[in-house]
Image (cartoon, rainbow, N blue to C red):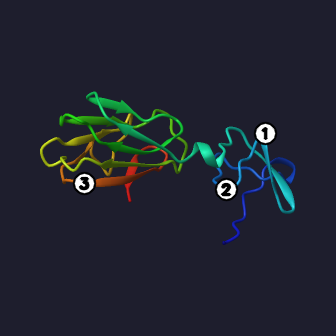
């Protein structure tokens, strides 16, 4: 793992608007202790909350929740589906969408951001059977990986 220096703020305190720290255990509270110092943080999510998988089995749309990571579209009756990306995501938020039924070639899955674009377009449409996409939020727009 590579160590990265954070910019210093007032009185030498480390500052950053969004910090992603990989860890395997749940973290509770508003601070995370790093060797040699403390980073003050808000909205820390435990490891159990950042990899939720939601399966869409009915309906025409689903809005990604704050703790959703992967959305699997696997409807009993085939029909087009819209996945709405979350409003106000944090910088670096990654989400995944997947045609788990294998019928996106006849029942497309449209991914729509609440604001901004995906790779310069207003929507991203999955039209390949078992197709999927990973998206990362870059601060204003989403990019596919």
Q: Earlier in the sequence, mark 3 or mark 1?
A: 1
Q: Is residue 97 left or right of residue 106?
A: right
Dot 1 lies on which element? loop
Q: Residue furthest top?
A: 59
The span from disc 3 to disc 1 (Cα, nearest Å) is 40 Å
Q: Position of residue 139 (x, y in %)?
A: 49, 46
Residue density around tag 1, few if under 14, some if 14–19, many if 20 or more, within 10 Å: few
Q: Position of residue 18 (x, y in %)?
A: 63, 47
Q: Which residue carries the number 2 mark?
A: 21
Residue at 38% in and 59% down: 145
Q: Are marks 2 and 3 in contact (CB under 8 Å)?
A: no
Q: Which residue carries the number 3 mark?
A: 130
Residue at 65% in and 51% down: 19
Q: Earlier in the sequence, mark 2 or mark 3?
A: 2
Residue at 25% in and 47% down: 101
Dot 2 lies on which element? loop
Q: Position of residue 71 (x, y in %)?
A: 39, 43
Decide: is 69 above or below 57. Answer: below
The span from disc 2 to disc 3 (Cα, nearest Å) is 32 Å
Q: Which residue carries the number 1 mark?
A: 29
Residue at 32% in and 52% down: 119
């Amino acid at each position: 793992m590579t160590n990265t220096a954070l910019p210093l703020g007032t009185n030498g305190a480390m500052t950053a608007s969004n910090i992603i720290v990989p860890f395997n255990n749940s973290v509770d509270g508003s601070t995370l202790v790093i060797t040699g110092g403390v980073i003050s943080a808000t909205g820390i999510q435990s490891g159990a909350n950042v990899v939720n998988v939601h399966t869409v089995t009915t309906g025409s749309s689903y809005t990604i929740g704050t703790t959703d990571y992967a959305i699997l579209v696997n409807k009993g009756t085939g029909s087009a589906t819209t996945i709405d990306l979350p409003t106000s995501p944090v910088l670096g938020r990654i989400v995944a969408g997947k045609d788990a039924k294998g019928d996106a070639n006849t029942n497309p899955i449209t991914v729509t951001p609440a604001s901004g674009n995906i790779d310069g377009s207003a929507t991203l449409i999955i039209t390949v059977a078992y197709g999927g996409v990973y998206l990362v939020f870059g601060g204003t727009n989403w990019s596919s990986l």
